[in-house]
Image: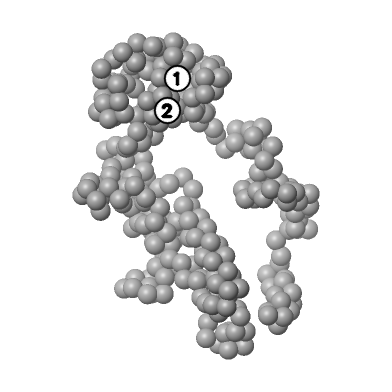
């Protein structure tokens, strides 16, 4: 870093590593799986009373990449305001700790150690995956108003009269009973039928899609989240699109393939020499 800054004083340097530049673990090696375990995410994921479960995507890698990108944007702004160029130091473990959100807060404030909940939410009921006649359905009725909309949409106004379900706190306390009560109704119809009914009533809900269903979802297509790249080696390469959309900035029609190793050296050096 010091050598590069001597040559390019406006250079912003970004580094992502397992444990960062400081602390007793700074020299250790790490992979996504390591920091998922160390950062507490695995202790919260999966079903109750089951072994620790890895998140299905590399959340350790992805979290660090996203935080690094945000840090670099902040460093660019700092430089533009006369604050000089800096190194952005992002540790994968730090990012996992930040992503613990309410689970960490519950321990720090209340001394509660969060446990795996399956698809349930530890603060809200009902807010989970339910079984239908032919599959699964996510219902996220996160307040009393939405609970009322859901009960009427299901044809179950009796749920509103049950004293065990009058408030979110009561529904949490009787969450097993509530799940069984709802699934007696939900199992009668197919997922698609319930989605039409619940969406029509304004109840937050959705299917549990497999990856192929995600790739072919009309909303995903409408948002250009599957794009094609004409790669000179592979040919037509389909990848996930950019989830950041900017009003007034049209989606690119052509996407540039990834450069070869060291392929952009001349352009990068030219840019550095301009700063």
> Residue 215 sits in which quadrant?
top right
Q: Is residue 83 visible?
A: yes
Q: How is the image coloured?
A: one colour
Q: Is residue 69 left or right of residue 126?
A: right
Q: Is residue 104 left or right of residue 90?
A: left
Nearest to N terminus: mark 2 or mark 1: 2
Q: Which mark is residue 149?
A: 1
Q: Position of residue 135 (x, y in %)?
A: 48, 23
Q: Position of residue 78 (x, y in %)?
A: 55, 72
Q: Which mark is residue 141?
A: 2
Q: Is residue 265 visible?
A: no
- Residue at (60, 84) in percent of width and height: 9
Q: Decide: is 11 above or below 122.
A: below
- The residues tagged by marks 2 and 1 sit, at their Cα atoms, a distance apart of 9 Å
Q: Can you name the residue that lies furthest to the left here?
A: 111
Q: Decide: is 216 above or below 21.
A: above
Labels 2 & 1 near each other (Cβ < 8 A): yes
- Residue at (59, 70) in percent of width and height: 76
Check disc 1: other Cα within 10 Å, few if <14, some if 14-19, many if 20+. some
- Residue at (52, 86) in percent of width and height: 2
Residue sitting nearer the eye, 85 or 24: 85
């Amino acid at each position: 870093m010091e050598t590069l800054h001597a040559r390019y004083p406006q250079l912003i340097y970004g580094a992502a590593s397992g444990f960062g530049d400081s602390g007793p673990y700074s020299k250790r090696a790490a992979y996504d799986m390591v920091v998922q375990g160390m950062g507490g995410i695995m202790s919260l994921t999966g079903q109750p009373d089951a072994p620790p479960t890895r998140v299905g995507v590399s959340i350790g890698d992805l979290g660090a990449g996203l935080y690094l990108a945000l840090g670099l944007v902040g460093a660019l702004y700092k430089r533009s305001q006369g604050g000089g160029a800096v190194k952005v130091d992002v540790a994968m473990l730090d990012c996992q700790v930040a992503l613990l959100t309410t689970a960490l807060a519950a321990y720090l404030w209340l001394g509660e150690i969060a446990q795996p909940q399956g698809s349930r939410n530890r603060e809200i009921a009902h807010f989970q995956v339910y079984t239908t006649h032919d599959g699964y359905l996510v219902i996220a009725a996160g307040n009393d108003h939405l609970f009322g909309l859901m009960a009427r949409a299901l044809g179950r106004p009796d749920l509103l009269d049950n004293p065990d379900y009058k408030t979110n706190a009561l529904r949490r306390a009787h969450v097993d009973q509530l799940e069984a009560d709802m699934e007696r109704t939900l199992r009668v119809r197919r997922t698609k039928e319930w989605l039409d009914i619940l969406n029509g009533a304004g109840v937050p809900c959705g299917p549990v899609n497999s990856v192929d269903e995600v790739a072919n979802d009309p909303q995903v297509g409408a948002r250009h989240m599957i794009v094609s790249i004409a790669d000179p080696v592979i040919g037509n390469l389909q990848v996930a699109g950019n989830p950041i959309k900017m009003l007034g900035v049209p989606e690119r029609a052509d996407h540039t393939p990834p450069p070869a190793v060291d392929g952009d050296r001349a352009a990068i050096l030219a840019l550095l020499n301009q700063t």
